[in-house]
């Protein structure tokens, strides 16, 4: 992992949050290299014991927030509230759920009850 090009940007956080290191590394590389997000920055979320990311999808102006986690983790509503608070209360957060086979599923989480679009 330490030979990978993204290791330099992530190394301070990988050792600080070892339980979330794999999910962070996998999600960061997916967003940066595969999806080609721009202005991608790592944001510490100490209340959630991990880091999240902010960035922009290609050809979009909106700054989006992503929080990586593992499929095997149990998350609570309090954890989600803390995530929104530490990210500065964005309109929504994408939860990047990582699996052991390197798949990532992104779920859009919004605060409160949100009516689905018709």
Image (tube, grey):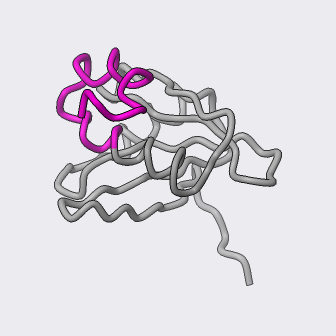
Above or below — where is 93 with respect to 13?
Answer: below
Q: Which of the two residues, 75 or 36, is positioned nearer the viewer here?
A: 36
Furthest residue toward bottom: 118
Residue at 63% x, 46% y is 37
Residue at 36% x, 19% y is 46
Above or below — where is 102 with respect to 85?
Answer: below
Left or right: residue 43 compared with residue 40? left
Residue at 46% x, 37% y is 81
Instruction: Choose top left, top right, bottom left or bottom right for residue 16.
Output: top left
Q: Which residues are magenta?
A: 1-25
Instruction: Choose top left, top right, bottom left or bottom right for residue 97.
Output: bottom left
Above or below — where is 16 with respect to 106?
Answer: above
Q: Position of residue 15 (x, y in %)?
A: 22, 19
Per the picture, the main secondary structure of the magenta-coloured stretch is helix
Above or below — where is 52 with respect to 56?
Answer: above
Of the 4 image quadrants, the one containing the N terminus is top left
Left or right: residue 26 compared with residue 62? left
Residue at 24% x, 41% y is 22
Q: Which of the two residues, 74 or 19, is positioned nearer the viewer here?
A: 19
Q: Position of residue 50 (x, y in %)?
A: 33, 29
Left or right: residue 69 compared with residue 64? left
Q: Position of residue 80 (x, y in %)?
A: 42, 42
Q: Does the magenta run of residues contain 9?
A: yes
Q: Position of residue 33 (x, y in %)?
A: 52, 49
Q: Does the magenta run of residues contain 70?
A: no
């Amino acid at each position: 992992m330490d030979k990978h090009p993204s290791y330099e940007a992530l190394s301070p956080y990988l050792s600080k949050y070892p339980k979330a290191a794999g999910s962070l590394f996998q999600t960061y590389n997916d967003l940066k290299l595969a999806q080609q997000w721009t202005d991608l920055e790592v944001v510490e979320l100490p209340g959630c014991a991990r880091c999240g990311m902010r960035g922009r999808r290609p050809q979009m102006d909106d700054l989006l927030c992503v929080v990586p986690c593992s499929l095997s983790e149990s998350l609570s509503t309090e954890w989600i509230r803390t995530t929104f608070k530490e990210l500065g209360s964005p309109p929504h957060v994408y939860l990047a759920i990582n699996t052991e086979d390197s798949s990532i599923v992104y779920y859009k989480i919004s605060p409160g009850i949100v009516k689905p679009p018709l």
